[in-house]
Image (spheres, rainbow, N blue to C red):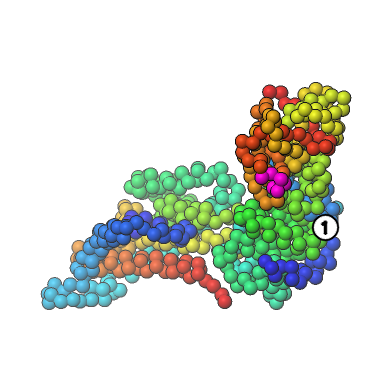
């Protein structure tokens, strides 16, 4: 892995090719009574890296398969570089895809796998060999060219799959949870490597994942899907700091739900008043959505809260605190300042001095 | 039947399971089980071999019963006929079942249970019932279709030199084994993802079949073929009732006049079966460890 950064950039023709725009217009797909895509609109500009994030069954994979041509939508259009490809078969779409499951052809060597798309395109043998070597160099597996897939680790197989997808110089790169079968450390390494290669080649990329940290760390923009619709699409910072809806707020990052009351444009929670972030619903009982790092905790004999667990994770430590009314909240504190906050400690919890996002209270 | 189940278990699709360090005493048990099983199989085979090489007159050992096989009356015809039937059955069964299994896997996964049940029918239905049905159709149809091309077709099916009717019946009988062997291969590999990967890389459907599906199913296809060959080379009931002289029928016919030779032929065919089995697993193993430097 250390060799990665020192390696030369990818094949010249890939780099010089400008990324193309991808547009989804009102994509609809039903499986029986289940609506997987419910009029999905999405615009991806050339060279952009967009992650589609959502819980399972939200339609993200269906959307990707519609772009790849494996799944024909019931309605709507897929446009690549302005061209309608909705009815173009998968093998004529010129897209590279990396799958969640290991997908290397078991009977072919690593180099043959990478060259498969070129063989299908009837390129000359020397060209195929040169190209496969270039791409294996790009993903750092030049020394594994003659191996068979079963002789590689999971991470290596997915890197070969990436090289194979890129070998045909596709217009769009599609990544269908390519990291989910790998262990944590490899996952982080490989996602960084995917991003590096994507930036080097400037290829338009759609990355489907259910892992928010994966999406937030690599993508230019992250689209959060819910029930076949796009809930919000924005840059990682904006998505985290200014979620458009309660669903996004809770799906991205960790979010505490606290009972609160809305009066006069301000929200009252944990005994203090704070400004409301974004559009405020009508006055009355609401749910305040507060990030763990936006809560402040202090040891206090008279405090009604009680620390339940303390989870150390390097620079920060997460506390699970039970409030007097029984609500449990997660609070992130600097590890250095939390040594006395052991389980059982009586504490007070209050929100930090910043606007608070609220959602309508759910009827019990 | 012992041969068949043995082979089905030998399918090369199962992943290698690491051998766990056994508890103390497990080795002795393993040995005991193997010894009992070994005796169970080896004693009858050993007895058969001894019977075929014993020279009754001199009390010594002779190979004359083996040497005499090729020239034995009717051997070449019956053996050649059975071999031809086996090859035709393999080709037809695979042509029918490979696309079926692949289609069920990729396009109609909901039909899997139905197809599985259908392919089990020949095991549920006694061969004798099947052959009685076939025989009544064969005797009724030529009369019914008299003076039409269909009648000729029915006669052609029953040509004693190469009875095609047996091929069709054997394809039905082989269905459970062929389906199972192929299905194991399909389940052992993620065919859906592999075909999608190939499609994504620009391959047409025929190309996907030729360069992805068939290589992936190679071991299963070999296993299925082997099972069919073993089945056809040993099938007795259908052939004898329909009145065709295939290899097993010939063995029974000469057993009256030349008992030692008939057993010698049986032993030989057993050896050939084993050799085929070893060949298949050797091919499979070579593929598994093939490595280029």
- Of residues A208 and A155, the one nearer the viewer is A155
Between residues B98 and B85, which one lies in front from this camera angle?
B98
Q: Residue at position x 84%, y 62% from top?
A: A18
Left or right for A149, reference B19: right
Residue at 63% across / 61% down in the picture? A155
Q: Is A34 on the left-hand or right-hand side of B16? A: right
Residue A182 in which image quadrant: bottom right
- Decide whether residue A224 is among the magenta residues: no
User: What residue does disc 1 label?
Assistant: A47
Give the image location of residue B225, x and y in percent: 45, 61
Left or right relative to B157: residue A316: right
Q: Which quadrant is the N terminus of chain B positioned in? A: bottom left
Q: Secondary structure at mark 1?
A: loop
What residue is drawn where x is 58% and y is 46%? B108
Q: Chain of mark 1?
A: A
Please provide the residue range marked out in magenta: A334-339
Closer to us: A251 or A266: A266
């Amino acid at each position: 892995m250390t060799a990665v950064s020192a390696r030369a950039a990818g094949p010249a023709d890939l780099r010089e090719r400008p990324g193309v725009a991808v547009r989804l217009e009102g994509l609809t797909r039903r499986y029986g009574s289940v609506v997987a895509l419910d009029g999905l609109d999405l615009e991806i500009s050339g060279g952009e890296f967009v992650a589609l994030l959502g819980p399972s069954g939200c339609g993200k994979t269906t959307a990707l398969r519609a772009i790849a041509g494996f799944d024909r939508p019931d309605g709507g259009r897929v446009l690549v570089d302005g061209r309608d490809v909705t009815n173009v078969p998968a093998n004529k779409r010129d897209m590279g895809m990396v799958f969640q499951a290991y997908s290397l052809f078991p009977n072919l060597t690593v180099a043959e796998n990478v060259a498969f798309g070129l063989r299908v395109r009837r390129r000359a043998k020397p060209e195929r060999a040169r190209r496969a070597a270039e791409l294996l160099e790009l993903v750092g597996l030049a020394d594994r060219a003659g191996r068979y897939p079963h002789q590689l680790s999971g991470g290596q197989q997915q890197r070969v799959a990436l090289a194979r997808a890129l070998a045909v110089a596709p217009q769009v790169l599609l990544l269908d949870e390519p990291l989910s079968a790998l262990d944590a450390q490899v996952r982080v390494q490989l996602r960084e490597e995917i991003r590096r290669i994507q930036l080097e080649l400037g290829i338009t990329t759609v990355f489907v994942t259910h892992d928010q940290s994966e999406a937030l760390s690599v993508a230019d923009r992250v689209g959060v899907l819910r029930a076949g619709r796009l809930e919000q699409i924005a840059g990682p910072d904006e998505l985290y700091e200014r979620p458009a809806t309660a669903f996004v707020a809770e799906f991205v990052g960790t979010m505490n739900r606290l009972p609160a009351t809305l009066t006069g444009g301000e929200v009252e929670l944990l005994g203090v008043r704070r400004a409301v972030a974004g559009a405020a619903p009508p006055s009355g009982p609401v749910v305040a959505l507060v990030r763990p790092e936006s809560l402040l905790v202090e040891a206090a004999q008279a405090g009604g809260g009680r620390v339940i667990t303390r989870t150390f994770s390097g620079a920060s430590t997460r506390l699970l605190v039970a409030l007097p009314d029984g609500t449990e909240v997660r609070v992130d504190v600097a590890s250095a300042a939390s040594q006395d906050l052991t389980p059982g400690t009586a504490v007070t919890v209050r929100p930090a001095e910043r606007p608070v996002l609220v959602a309508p209270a759910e009827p019990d | 039947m012992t041969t068949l189940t043995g082979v089905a278990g030998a399918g090369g699709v199962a992943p290698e399971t690491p051998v766990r360090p056994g508890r103390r005493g497990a080795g002795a048990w393993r040995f005991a089980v193997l010894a009992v099983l070994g005796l169970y199989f080896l004693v009858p085979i050993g007895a058969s071999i001894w019977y075929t090489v014993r020279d009754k007159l001199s009390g010594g050992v002779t190979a004359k019963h083996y040497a005499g096989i090729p020239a034995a009356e009717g051997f070449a015809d019956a053996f050649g006929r059975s071999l031809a039937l086996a090859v035709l059955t393999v080709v037809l069964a695979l042509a029918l079942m490979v696309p079926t299994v692949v289609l069920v896997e990729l396009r109609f996964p909901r039909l899997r249970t139905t197809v599985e049940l259908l392919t089990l029918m020949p095991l549920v239905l006694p061969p004798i019932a099947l052959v009685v049905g076939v025989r009544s159709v064969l005797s009724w149809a030529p009369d019914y279709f008299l003076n039409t091309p269909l009648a000729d077709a029915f006669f052609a099916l029953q040509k004693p030199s190469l009875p095609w009717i047996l091929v069709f019946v054997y394809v039905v009988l082989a269905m459970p084994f062929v389906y199972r062997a192929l299905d194991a291969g399909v389940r052992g590999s993620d065919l859906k993802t592999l075909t999608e990967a190939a499609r994504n890389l620009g391959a047409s459907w025929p190309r996907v079949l030729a360069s992805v599906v068939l290589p992936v199913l190679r071991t299963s296809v070999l296993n299925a073929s082997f099972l069919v060959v073993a089945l056809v080379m040993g099938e007795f009931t259908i052939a004898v009732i329909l009145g065709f002289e295939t290899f097993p029928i010939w063995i029974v016919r000469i057993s009256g006049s030349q008992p030692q030779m008939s057993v010698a032929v049986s032993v030989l065919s057993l050896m050939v079966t084993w050799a085929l089995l070893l060949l298949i697993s050797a091919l499979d193993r070579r593929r598994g460890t093939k490595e280029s430097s």
